[in-house]
Image (spheres, rainbow, N blue to C red):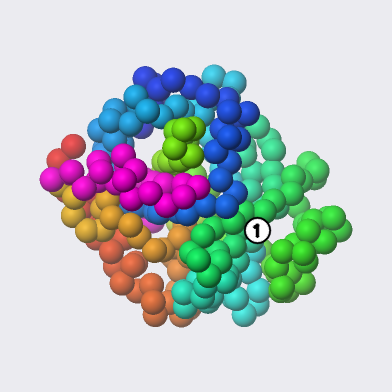
């Protein structure tokens, strides 16, 4: 049993159907980087008010992703430049259940994230798009015809939810990227990516309070970060990409890894 697995043993569990009550396909999102060691204290303080997703007696789930972009890297560049209307396109496989989706994640002018998806019928989760999937993408993304695969990623996730608050918190560890040529990168060993997902933005979330109260919180640990897992992967796996707006974020993530390794548990 892994260290992080121990942290979530005491939670009451909910099933996938109950989690659908907080599916939050239209939501606000905040993202944080923390040392895995912090997850114990955080999970202990949240377990009274949150339930954990459990399917077939499993609470940790592996996610496999294949991201797409255009030859001009429209998705990447729009994100780096902070464009209000932007898109992220991927195939996501929920490895435990063997179910996969073609997903489009967009961000609108109000800073809200929206997710649209269609379930795949292909036996191989990362096989080429079907005609039906191409039609779905064309209805969602203006440059759908130009999309090509650019990056694989995978990670392990725990999901907890407060149904009454309309809030979900995910804890992602073991983040790994793989290029189309098979090279692998693990830029966040020892760290977890925590995402707070809400139907309506509420800065009074218990998670934010927990971070504020930590006496060992040093930037960027426990503070909102702007960089996404997709952008992080593209920049780590392709040194030729322009990333002016993200150089500081990359430096912060490098520092986070160092600080996380030197903090006492």
Viewer-closest of 113 and 80: 113
Viewer-closest of 186 and 222: 222
According to the image, label 1 marks what residue? 104
Above or below for 58 versus 184: above
Horizontal side of 101 relative to 180 (left or right) equals: right
Above or below for 9 versus 159: above
Residue 23 appears at what percent x and percent y?
58, 41
Residue 133 appears at what percent x and percent y?
79, 56
Q: Quadrant of residue 170?
A: top left
Above or below for 38 versus 8: below
Above or below for 100 versus 80: above
Question: Which residue is rendered at x = 44% and y = 20% of the image?
Answer: 12
Is residue 179 on the magenta stretch?
no
Residue 76 appears at what percent x and percent y?
54, 72
Residue 59 appears at what percent x and percent y?
49, 27
> Which span of residues is magenta-colored?
187-215
């Amino acid at each position: 049993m892994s260290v992080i697995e121990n942290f979530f043993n005491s939670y009451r569990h909910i099933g996938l159907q109950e989690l659908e009550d907080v599916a939050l396909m239209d939501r606000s999102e905040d993202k944080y980087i923390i040392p895995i060691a912090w997850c114990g204290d955080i999970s202990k303080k949240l377990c009274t008010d949150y339930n954990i997703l459990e399917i077939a007696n499993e609470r940790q789930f592996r996610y496999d992703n294949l991201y797409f972009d255009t030859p001009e890297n429209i998705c990447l560049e729009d994100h780096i430049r902070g464009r209000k209307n932007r898109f992220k396109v991927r195939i996501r496989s929920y490895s435990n259940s063997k179910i996969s989706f073609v997903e489009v994640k967009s961000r609108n002018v109000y800073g809200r994230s929206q997710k649209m998806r269609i379930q795949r019928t292909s036996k191989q989760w990362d096989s080429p798009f079907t005609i039906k999937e191409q039609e779905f993408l064309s209805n969602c993304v203006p440059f759908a015809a130009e999309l090509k695969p650019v990056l694989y990623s995978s990670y392990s996730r725990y999901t907890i939810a407060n149904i009454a608050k309309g809030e979900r918190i995910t804890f992602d560890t073991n983040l790994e990227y793989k290029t189309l040529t098979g090279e692998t990168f693990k830029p966040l060993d020892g760290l977890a990516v925590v995402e707070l997902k809400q139907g309506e933005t509420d800065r009074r979330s218990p998670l934010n309070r927990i971070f504020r109260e930590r006496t060992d919180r040093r930037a960027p640990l426990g503070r909102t970060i702007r960089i996404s897992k997709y952008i992080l992967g593209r920049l780590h796996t392709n040194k030729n990409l322009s990333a002016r707006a993200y150089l500081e974020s990359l430096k912060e993530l490098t520092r986070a890894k160092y600080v996380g390794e030197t903090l006492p548990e």
